Image: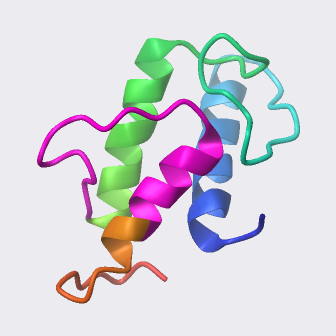
Amino acid sequence: MTDSMFALIAEELARIAADKGETLPALGPDTRFLGGELPIDSLDLATLLVVLEQRTGQDPFRAGFIQFNTVGELAALYRSVLNRPDVSTGFA
């Protein structure tokens, strides 16, 4: 899975892990955010969501929280918002 949203999530997760002195393991669409092998906690996940909103200009949670557990699920949430015809953003 090499789409741009997945790549952006991977880039930000790597930065968060590096800031903590950790190494990010290989990511796949089924990689779980919490309780798995990622060296992040719930605060790191919240930070990731803020950064993704800043970088994409979109918030898939604006209408309310949507459950997600994996990197692939989060990427799909952002893709669904970014691919809507009424959304204009500089993010490709």
**26 on left or right of 8:** right
Does 73 appear above or below 24?
below
Indicate whether residue 78 is drawn in magenta: yes
Q: Residue at x 38, y 40 (%)?
A: 49
Q: Give the quadrant of residue 41.
A: top right
Looking at the rendered structure, the number of numbered marks drawn on it comes to 0
Comparing 25 with 18, the one in front is 25
Q: Quadrant of the N terminus?
A: bottom right
Q: Identify the image quadrant of residue 35.
A: top right
Residue 70 x/y as whole percent: 61, 36
- The x and y percentages for residue 59 are 25, 54
Q: Is residue 44 above or below residue 88?
A: above
Region rendered in magenta: 58-79
Residue at image position (76%, 69%) is: 2
Residue at 67%, 72% in the rendered image = 3
Q: Is residue 68 left or right of residue 10?
A: left
* Residue name at image x 32 percent, y 67 percent: 81
Q: Position of residue 45 (x, y in %)?
A: 47, 26
* In this rendering, position of residue 91 left or right of residue 64: right
